[in-house]
Amino acid sequence: MPDVQGRCLACGGSSLFLGEGGHVTCARIGCPDPTSVDDLLHGRADEQPHVHAALQAVIDLARQIPRIVSEASQPDRYALAPPPADGSVVASDG
């Protein structure tokens, strides 16, 4: 049975394989839902609440990317100390 690249949506294992009938299946014995990837591929993800929750979390994170990039690119983002509240400039000893 051929291995499939990727990870199982239910357990995170990298033990996916192409099972009988061409269905993507997880080979881990402790996997709570070995057919979760196949269900997603066949449009049955809504039947699996944990799959739907994982997909929604990825969508929510993707929507935050512009804000995260904007905050990370602020010039004072990594300053050692915050600027003085009164707007004055602090002199350095160097």
Image (spheres, grey):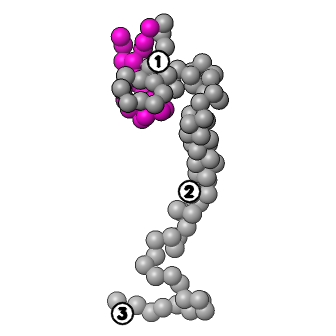
> Which residue is situated farthest in the top direction here?
21
Q: Which mark is residue 38?
A: none
Q: Which residue is mark 3?
A: 93
Residue 4 versus residue 94 in the image, above or below: above
Give the residue drawn at x 37%, y 22%. Answer: 27
Amino acid under label 3?
Asp
Q: Earlier in the sequence, mark 2 or mark 3?
A: 2
Nearest the viewer among 56 and 36 is 36
**Quarter assignment of residue 5:** top left
Q: Which mark is residue 69?
A: 2
Q: Which residue is mark 1?
A: 24
- Secondary structure at numbered mark 3: loop
The answer to whether one can see residue 62 in this image is no
Residue 78 versus residue 18 in the image, above or below: below
Give the residue drawn at x 48%, y 32%. Answer: 9
The answer to whether one can see residue 73 in this image is yes
For the residues labelled 2 and 1, the Cα–Cα distance comes to 36 Å
Q: Position of residue 63 (x, y in %)?
A: 63, 48
Nearest the viewer among 12 and 60 is 12
Residue 80 versus residue 66 in the image, above or below: below
**Residue segment shown in magenta:** 1-20
For the residues labelled 3 and 1, the Cα–Cα distance comes to 65 Å
> Which quarter of the image is occupied by the N terminus?
top left
